[in-house]
Every structure is written in C-alpha cells, then in structure tokens.
Image: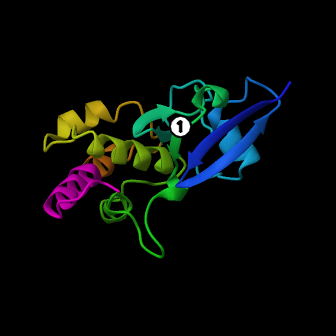
Amino acid sequence: MTFSISLTINGDVRQIELDDPRVTLLDLLRERLDLTGTKKGCDRGQCGACTVLVDGRRINSCLALAVSLDGASVETIAGVGGEGALHPVQEAFIAHDGFQCGFCTPGQIMSAIGLIREGQAGSDPERVRELMSGNICRCAAYAGVTQAVLEAQKALSTEGRAAA
C-alpha cells in the first residue's frame, strides 16, 4: 500500500508517494529528496541536529512521521537565505563563531530562526540558552550560539522584518 502526501518544502510543493507509513520526515528529506543539510544525529529526538520548521514551528524531524504531515509546509536549512545571500542568523553564527565542527549547525540555525520568529528570543542570554537547550553541540560552542541568536534577533527587529 502506498500513501500519497503533499508537502511544501522550502517553498516548493512536492507530491510524494510513500510505500511505508513509518518513514520519518528526516529520512524523507535526506534519503528521498536529497536535502542532506538536515542532519541525523541521535535519531531519537535528543540532540536537535535534525531540527526543521513545520508550519513555522520547530520540530525534531527524526520524530515526525512524514505521512502525518500531509499538507504541511516544511522549511529546512536549504531553504533559508536568498540567492547568493546568507540569512541574518547564518551571518550571526559566522560572526560569533557559533559553530566548530559544524555538524549541529543546521539544526541550531533552524532552531534559532524558529525561536526568533516565535518572538521568544528577547535580550536575555539565559532565556536564549534555555530555549535553545534542545540543540546539543558536542564542541560546546554555546556561548557563540547564544550571542549569534541575540545579535540576529536585534538585527531582524531593527530591520522590522521577520526572520524570513
């Protein structure tokens, strides 16, 4: 039995046939759609490396069954930024050394974008650390991540635009 779903992925509507209802969104993105920027870390929802935005909300894509997301809008790291331009959160991560090995960076950036869009970032570093705590960094680049989120939040609010 196959399941037909429609997902808007990074702005493109995709009609997808699934032959197994147990396929996670992460595996669909990486293995079927070649969107390998979303990383598979723990595959148990504990590390945050697979964070994407679904209908604007941060989720661990390793825990979401693709078939349950029919009609949803999914934004991955491949969908941020513009033609030849980085997203302000990506720029802030570079400016503040918010990454070292880079494995967790796509999930960290997607979580930061979601956090800013939710209006939760504010200006309190402790609050940012708490709200980003679902994203683990083995290299411990947390100070840079926190500063990057705070800078991007400020830049985006000053520009008067959402973290698009």
Is 48 within the magenta?
no
| Residue 89 percent location from the top left of the image | 34, 57
Q: Is residue 154 left or right of residue 142?
A: left
Majority secondary structure of magenta residues: helix
Residue 7 at least partly seen: yes
Res 64 quadrant in image? top right
User: Hey, what amino acid is under mark 1?
Assistant: Ala
| Image: 33 above or below 3 | below
Residue appearing at x 38%, y 60% in the figure: 90
Q: Secondary structure at mark 1?
A: loop
Magenta segment:
147-164
Can I make out residue 39 in this image? no
* Residue underneath mark 1: 72
Q: Residue at x 66, y 28 (%)?
A: 67
Note whether 131 is above or below 85 in the view shown: above
Task: Kindly give the residue lying farthest to the right in the view shown.
Answer: 1
Q: Where does the N terminus fall, quadrant-wise?
A: top right
Instruction: Describe residue 110's horizontal placement relative to residue 24 as left or right.
Output: left
